[in-house]
Image: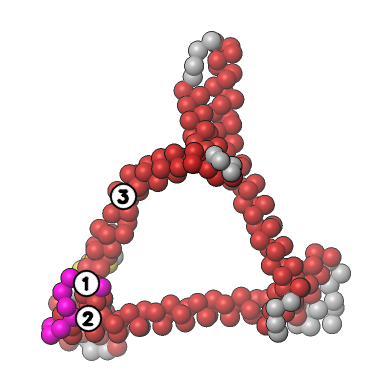
Amino acid sequence: MHISTDIFVWIAAALTLCIYSFLYKDNPFYKFAEHLLVGVSAGYLLVIEFNNNLMPNLFMPLRDGFGILLREHRFGGELAAIVPGLLGLLVLARLLPKGGWMSRWAFGFYFGAFQGLAITGSMQAYIFAQIFGTFVTNGNPVFSLVLFKDFGLHPGLGPLVLAISGPIMILGVISTLTYFFFSTEHKGFVGGVAKIGIVFLMVGFGASFGYTVMARVSLLIGRIQFLLSDWLGLIS
């Protein structure tokens, strides 16, 4: 047993125990660690945003633009950065008791511009690419009679999975979309397809939940390993 002498390891271990103390009940130690995490994260993100966005996109262009204005007595294109800068300041007008209405201009411009710029990319990423990915994988159609022919010539679990996975995926996509199609009453054939979609939805939700549980368990194992190895030295 070799307990760590690193003060930062002790701090990390103490904060870890404070967080897991919530398993007993809500307590001041957990609240302290929670507020510390939120505060440090907010401060870190503020510094990142300032260095990665405000500096290169606002302050540096304005500095160069005013430099050109003072040296050459002309307006450079860099001064155009003052427009988004002013819009950003208008967002902060929400903090003013009587000036909050001015922030609506900035929010309106932001949401309108974002919708106009994002609609093309969203259509490509969330509609066309998804449709293409449903029917084609690795440049080959997911439903191919060649795969069933290969399974007939070489019976086995691997060829069977390759042959039926494509049709199952297509059936799952179509039946799931049918379940969310409310313009037609879910009776008869449409109702049957919608029920199949429910099965695929439950399988998808279950897999997602299982993946989430595995991720959380992995985090727990990592913290326990840190406590027993890096902090207490009980395991190597």
Element marked by disc 1: loop
Q: Earlier in the sequence, mark 2 or mark 1?
A: 1
Q: Is residue 165 visible?
A: yes
The magenta span reads 180-189
Please say if the residues under marks 2 and 1 sit with CB atoms less than 8 Å apart: yes
In the rendering, which numbered label is found on residue 43?
none
Q: Is residue 61 left or right of residue 151?
A: right
Q: What secondary structure prevails in the magenta region?
A: loop
Q: Is residue 120 left or right of residue 1?
A: left
Q: Is residue 150 visible?
A: no
In the rendering, which numbered label is found on residue 119?
3
Percent coordinates x, y for residue 179 in the rendering: 24, 77
Disc 3 and disc 2: Cα gap in Å?
29 Å
Amino acid type at image mark 3: Ile
- Which residue is identified by label 2? 194
Q: Count how many numbered circles sit on residues in the image.
A: 3
Based on the picture, tell me whether residue 40 belongs to the magenta stretch. Answer: no
Mark 1 burial class by Cα count in 10 Å: few <14, some 14-19, many 20+: few
Of 191 and 77, the residue lying toward us:
191
Element marked by disc 2: helix
Q: Determine the residue positioned at 49% across, 41% down.
A: 101
Amino acid type at image mark 1: Phe
Q: Is residue 142 left or right of residue 111?
A: left
Element marked by disc 3: helix
Q: Is residue 157 above or below residue 78?
A: below
Q: Determine the residue positioned at 54% across, 39% down.
A: 99
- Which residue is identified by label 1? 181
Percent coordinates x, y for residue 120 in the rendering: 29, 48
Please say if the residues under marks 3 and 2 sit with CB atoms less than 8 Å apart: no
